[in-house]
């Protein structure tokens, strides 16, 4: 049975993963309507992955005798100055999510909830990948992508790391 404190912070993460999914959808929609179809594809897939992250938390909470609560989501920003601006925001957001996951990990240690601690390890690894892939894309943009957005947009999907870890069950 989940302790209330752990259940509440996991429900907070349901909201954060769901918001991430919506945020990346908003970014995908901006990219798609500004001629960046490759960037949009990358972001649509990213949004689907965040939806799966939300589901993992929902199922875990319910499986452990808690109750996952569907939150209201705040409206993500709809317009961006550039693709670089989008990925700066992606990196900032992933750093925020990493901090959020780390906070839950710390609480599970305080509460001696080793099951939840174990469940979270998948997310700890995932966040390393998420930040690295946002940084890689920003590097590519700064390395010259900015001067040739057509080529960058065409090639961005080749920068995706295989989704194998995303599909694995924690
Ligand atoms: Fe996530
Ligand atoms: Fe993420």
Image (cartoon, rainbow, N blue to C red):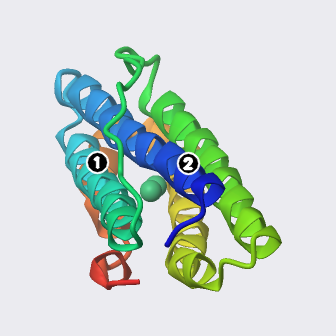
> In the image, which disc is placed on residue 99?
none
Q: Nearest the camera: 137 or 129?
A: 129
Q: Nearest the camera: 170 or 25?
A: 170
Q: How many marks?
A: 2
Q: Is residue 46 above or below residue 28?
A: below
Between the residue at mark 2 and the residue at mark 1, the CA separation in whole angstroms equals 24 Å
Q: Is residue 144 visible?
A: no
Q: Is residue 35 above or below residue 147?
A: above
Q: Tell me which residue sits at (29%, 27%) in the image.
A: 26
Q: Is residue 33 visible?
A: yes
Residue ID for mark 1: 47
* Mark 1 burial class by Cα count in 10 Å: few <14, some 14-19, many 20+: many
- Residue 55 falls in image quadrant: bottom left
Residue ID for mark 2: 8
- Residue 21 falls in image quadrant: top left
Where does residue 5 sit, x and y in percent of width and height? 65, 53
Dot 2 and dot 1 residues touching (CB under 8 Å): no
Q: Is residue 118 left or right of residue 43?
A: right
Q: Tell me which residue sits at (63%, 78%) in the image.
A: 117
Q: Tell me which residue sits at (60%, 73%) in the image.
A: 124
Foreground tag (2 vs 1): 2
Please state, as top left, top right, bottom left or bottom right, where the C terminus lies in the image: bottom left
SS at mark 1 in the image:
helix
- Residue 96 falls in image quadrant: top right
Where does residue 18 sit, x and y in percent of width and height? 36, 42
SS at mark 2 in the image:
helix
Q: Tell me which residue sits at (18%, 30%) in the image.
A: 32
Q: Is residue 4 left or right of residue 166?
A: right
* Mark 2 burial class by Cα count in 10 Å: few <14, some 14-19, many 20+: some
Where does residue 147 sit, x and y in percent of width and height? 46, 37
């Amino acid at each position: 049975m989940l302790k209330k404190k752990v259940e509440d912070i996991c429900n907070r993460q349901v909201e954060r993963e769901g918001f991430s999914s919506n945020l990346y959808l908003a970014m995908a929609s901006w990219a798609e309507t500004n001629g960046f179809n490759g960037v949009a594809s990358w972001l649509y897939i990213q949004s689907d992955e965040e939806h799966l992250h939300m589901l993992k938390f929902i199922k875990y909470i319910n499986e452990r005798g808690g109750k996952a609560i569907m939150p209201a989501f705040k409206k993500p920003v709809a317009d961006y100055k550039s693709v670089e601006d989008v990925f700066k925001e992606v990196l900032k957001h992933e750093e925020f999510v990493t901090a959020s996951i780390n906070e839950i990990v710390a609480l599970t240690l305080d509460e001696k909830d080793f099951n939840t601690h174990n469940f979270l390890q998948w997310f700890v690894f995932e966040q390393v990948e998420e930040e690295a892939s946002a940084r890689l894309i920003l590097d590519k943009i700064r390395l010259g992508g900015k001067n040739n957005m057509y080529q960058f947009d065409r090639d961005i999907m080749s920068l995706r790391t295989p989704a194998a870890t995303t599909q694995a069950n924690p």
